[in-house]
Image: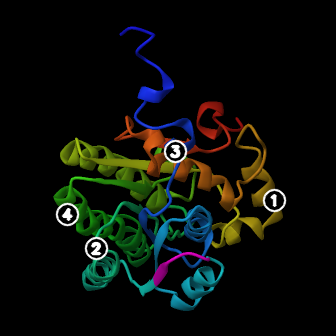
Amino acid sequence: MNNKDWTINNWYATPQKMFDVEDKVTVVTGAASGLGRAIALGFGALGAKLVLADLNTDGAEETAAEIDVEKIVVKCDVSRLEDVQNLLKQTLDHYKRVDVSFNIPGINVRKPALELTYDEWDSVIEINLKGVFRCAKEIGKVMVDQKKGSMINMASVFSEIVMPRQVAYASTKGAIRQMTRVLAAEWAPHVRVNAIGPCYMETPLVKQVMENKEWYEKVKRQNMLQRFGKPEEVVGPSIFLASEASRLITGFMLLVDAGWHCYGGEV
C-alpha cells in the first residue's frame, strides 16, 4: 500500500466516528442495577436507542428515567424462553432491528462445593448460563438474518482464575467464554460476538463480600490496583466492543479486572 493513498480520509471511519454508538439499537438485559444499569446510562448519554430489560421493571424504569433518549422498558425473566422471545418481539416492533446486545444477567451463591445444594447449583446455571444462551440465540437469529450486529456477553475474571466458593458461578462464566467463541465462529463474518470479563465490581451482586470487612480487604488485594471496580468502569470497554472501533475483533474476552489475571493475586 502506498502511504500517499493510505490517508485518514480513506479509513473506514474517522477517529471521531470509530467509537460512535449514536442511534444504535442496544438491548441491555439486567438494566435495573449494577453493570447493566451503568451500560444503559453510558449508551444513553451517547445517543443510543435503548431496550432496558429486567425482571425488576421498577428498577429498569428508574434507569430509564435518567436517560434522555428513545428507550423502551421490557419485563424479562431470562429463565423463561417466552419472556426472552417477547423481549425480542417488542424490540423489533418498536425499532425494526437490533444493532447491539448486552447479555448480562447473573447471580451467585458463594459456598464451598460440598455445601452448595443442587437447587442452588441449578439456580445459578439457569440464569447465568442458560439465560445468557436464550438471549444470545434469540437475538442472534435476528442479527444473523440482518447480517449485522455486535453481541457482548458478560463473563468474568473467574472464566480464567480460581477462587474458593465460586464453583457454580465460575463454571457458568467459563462456559460463557467458550460459548462466545463458538457463536463468533458460527455467526461470522457479519455478526461479532465478544465477552467482557470484569473483576469484583461495586454492585449489588457483591454486596455479601463488601459487607464483610475481612473478606472485602482480602479480595481487594488480589489485583494490581488493590480495589474493586466501579460500574462505570465497564462502560468504556462496552462502547469499544459495540462500536466500529473493534470491528476486527470477535470471539474475544476483554478482561476488565485491574490486572487480576496476570498478577495472580496473593500467595
Distance from label 2 to label 4 (Cα)?
A: 14 Å
User: Which of the two discs, 1 and 4, labels the residue nearer the N terminus?
Assistant: 4
Q: Is residue 233 above or below residue 5?
A: below
Label 2 belongs to which residue? 96
Identify which residue is drawn at 60% across, 56% down. Answer: 235
Label 2, label 3: how far apart the Cα atoms are:
23 Å
Residue under label 3: 17
Gap between marks 3 and 1 measured at Cα: 46 Å
- Quick one: quadrant of the C terminus? top right
Query: Which residue type carries mark 3?
Result: Lys
For the image shown, how many numbered marks are present on the structure? 4
2 or 3: tag closer to the N-terminus: 3
Give the residue at mark 4: 141
Q: Is residue 165 part of the magenta span, yes or no?
A: no
The residue pinned by badge 1 equals 214
Q: Secondary structure at mark 3?
A: helix
**Neighbour tally class for label 1: few under 14, some 14-19, many 20 plus, Cα within 10 Å:** few
* Residue 50 image position (x, y, % from top left): 47, 72
Hey, which quadrant is residue 128 in on the image?
A: bottom left
Query: In this rendering, which labeled residue sits more in front, label 2 or label 4?
Result: 2
Q: Secondary structure at mark 4?
A: helix
